[in-house]
Amino acid sequence: MVHRQYGVPKSGDEGRQSTPKQIQRVFKKDVFSVLQPLTIYDITRAHLLDISGRVEKRGSLSVAEKLRSWSTQLFIYASVVVPNMGENPPKDLDVVALPLPPVENNPFLRMGIVPLLSATPHRCKPGIEHLPQGSCS
């Protein structure tokens, strides 16, 4: 990884879901097969759109979103260190991205229960936890 060449310290535990590991996995699986024969000067928005579309097509919308973000960061960095870099190919790719599905934080919490949950703690004595249902009144 490029950041290691420049002495950027690695962060803590690098498990399967760590960002560096995920970047390596995604780039190996999705990016290098398309971009490997190209120089950084030859990479176009169409290439990046094709890669992002392939990832979205398999249903990995959050990975596609991260990939667009990583590509943007990579090309911003390249615009500083690569001579005559030119335009930023990943610019505005999020405009044509598929929208992420709505977040389902707690599928077991129903809207009818929310008023009860927000009202109940106000009627309980402070410091008492795990009371049987209906004992706070």
Image: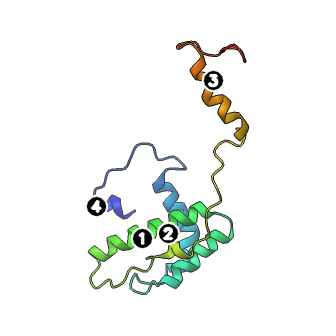
If you read the primary sequence from the N terminus, does the residue marked by circle 4 or circle 3 appear first? Answer: 4
Check the picture and name the quadrant holding the C terminus: top right
Write down the residue under mark 4.
6
Q: Quote the CA–CA distance across marks 4 and 3.
A: 55 Å
Q: Are marks 1 and 3 in contact (CB under 8 Å)?
A: no
Residue beneath the point at 69% across and 13% down: 135
Q: Nearer the viewer, mark 4 or mark 3?
A: 3
Secondary structure beneath dot 3 equals: helix
Secondary structure beneath dot 2 equals: helix
Amino acid type of the residue that numbered disc 3 sits on in the rendered structure = Thr
Write down the residue under mark 3.
120
Position of residue 61 measured from the top left corner of the image (x, y, whole percent): 61, 64
Secondary structure beneath dot 4 equals: loop
Q: Are marks 1 and 2 in contact (CB under 8 Å)?
A: yes
Write down the residue under mark 1.
72
Q: Is residue 114 left or right of residue 88?
A: right
